[in-house]
Image (tube, rainbow, N blue to C red):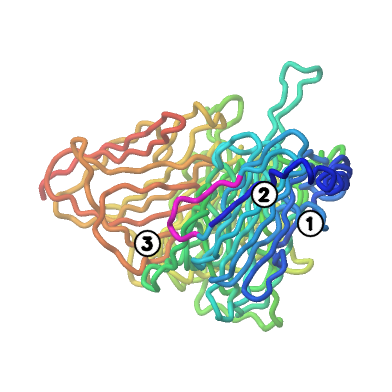
Amino acid sequence: MSHTGTGRSSTALAALCLTLLPRLALAAVPAEVQPNDNRRAAGNLAAGVLTLRLEVREAVWNPEGEDGPRIPVQAFAEEGRPPANPGPLIRVPAGTRVRISAHNLLPAQAVAIHGFHSHSGAAPAVLTVEPLETRDIEFPAAQPGVYFYWGTTTGASLDTRNGVDSQLSGAFVVDPPDAATAPDRIFLLGHWFRAGNPKATPPEPDLEAWVINGKSWPHTERLAYPAGRTVRWRWINATDENHPLHMHGHYFRVEATGDAAHWTTLAASRRRRVATEVLTSGSSLALSWTPERPGNWLFHCHVLFHIAPELRQTPDPPGSHHEEHDAARHMAGLVLGITIAQPKTAAAAPASEPRRLWLVAGQRKGVDLHGAPGLGYRLADAGGRGAGGPGAFTAPGPPLVLTRGQPVEIAVENQLPQSTSVHWHGIELESYYDGVPGWGGEGKHITPPIRPGETFVARFTPPRAGTFMYHTHLNDFVQLSTGLYGPLIVVEPGRRFDPESDKIFVLSRGGTDDEKDPFLINGSASPAPIELRAGMRYRFRLICITPAPNLVVTLERDGRRESWRMIAKDGAALPQAVQQPAVVDMYPGETYDFEFRPGSAGSLTLTARNAFFKLQTVAPMSVRMP
């Protein structure tokens, strides 16, 4: 590897000025950043050598479409092309020599560029380019994988970068040598933040944008696929935070994972099927999935602060109210919309008479959370009798126990003074019943919000047994923080849910103050003790539906960690289940099933903690001899 600056002698000064003057003139007028869908590889690839002339420029960026705000940022550009977000895609076969000339057109700031190296395990170099300087770097693209390069002009690390230099990121993909690669798509996550001034007149709010390939929902790319054809995606997290990525109505298979310097292709036995996968800051992954059901679907981050409509800097029209309008208004940020098409066929008749449930959403009596009423669910009988009666609403809502292969109709009645919806998280079902108002369904048959006093009937047949959840998908942060969520368990035909051996732990948040409100286990910050028997086999079903932060969950005895077997993730059985220390890092939207057999009498604690907020909740357990 080599990299050289352009320290030139005085005899070349005139030539240098002639070279720089056009660039200085170009840099004086910030250009508009263009979204980059990562379909076109940059540079010139010939005779096994990629030559790329890269620029760092001042630019203006609009993550919210033509009518949105124009944000001053720094951006990468391929010479002769407009600045792009993400930066120009570098994509080459392994073994290619990569030659990059990096031109810094910023008049007063040096840029440090990370990621220009061979990904062979050696300590990666950082290419620092001073203002108005050009530096060259050359290296072999040695290790196939999905990587990225990124820059900073503020000295920030990747996990602290979110300002003017936060969009200096680009994908770097190295394909296997001399091998045809299956068609894929590459998505890079970005984040920009500017602190407001609460003392200004009027007060200036914080401004923020979370983007996929340079755009925020509803301006992110809309994808369309035919049913039955395998889809391959590559995801890169160039942001300062972690993202649990959730697929509606389908599972996807994680095939490989990596970061800016390493890449690991998973063995077939380790390729788990999931509905939610965490992409940590600086990491990347390859996934595949097969569209199976027609209609509109979502793929999004499950951290509510990354998809909240309040992120939008383009104000709503006067008199509008996002919960009553389409999905373009009640979400923003890290959301992709997917439409699956297939020829219409006659719907198959249910194999058996559906089971009917009546789920009611309402306010919990006497519960006030910072001025917001506590919300919850309760069950009425199958005909709705008792729906308007005095029965208590609870958070979490009552466990819904269904049977694999048995059709179900769940009538959701809204007794709230605001619209709501219910998303059957992790369940494979028809798009119309998925619970995303203004988006789910097909054509003109689009899922409506459940308005006050209305009832919506969701119909589906669970295709697999496992641990799932149901929760609101409208006005998400407030409704979720105040109680609209619950566990959904699907058992095998002929089996029953046994609360003696099946233990559900719903991990949530007890209010809308994301810094102070406690974490809850089964709706309580001080859960009642759970009694277990030594030698008995238990299934611990862990469900995380916090609005934002992750929780590290541990099971300990006298300060020493127990062990358990992880047997399922997101309702799907894992290909391998091995005994391991009893600890798991859970993010919003994830479920895990563990098999646990206490060996002797004594006291245990199941603890859910978040180090950043310095908060934890403990569920005590006592183990007695049979």
Q: Is residue 587 left or right of residue 30?
A: left
Please identify, in this view, whether the residue under mark 3 or under mark 1 is nearer the observer: 1
Query: Of the residues under marks 2 and 3, which one precedes in the sequence?
Result: 2
Mark carried by residue 568? 3
Cα–Cα gap, marks 1 and 2 = 14 Å
Q: Which residues are magenta?
A: 119-127
Type of amino acid under label 3 = Ala
SS type, badge 3: strand
SS type, badge 1: loop
Type of amino acid under label 2 = Arg
Q: Measuring from the top left, give residue 147's x and y in whole percent.
A: 55, 58
State which quadrant residue 611 falls in: top left
Does 540 appear in magenta? no
Q: Is residue 466 left or right of residue 14?
A: left
Mark carried by residue 483? none
SS type, badge 2: strand
Q: Residue at x 44, y 35 (%)?
A: 519
Q: Residue at x 64, y 61 (%)?
A: 99
Is 514 drawn above or below residue 471 in the view shown? above
Mark carried by residue 135? 2
Type of amino acid under label 1 = Glu
Q: Residue at x 30, y 41 (%)?
A: 606
Q: Measuring from the top left, give residue 437's x and y in whole percent.
A: 70, 54
Residue in the foreground of this view, choosing between 117 and 61: 117
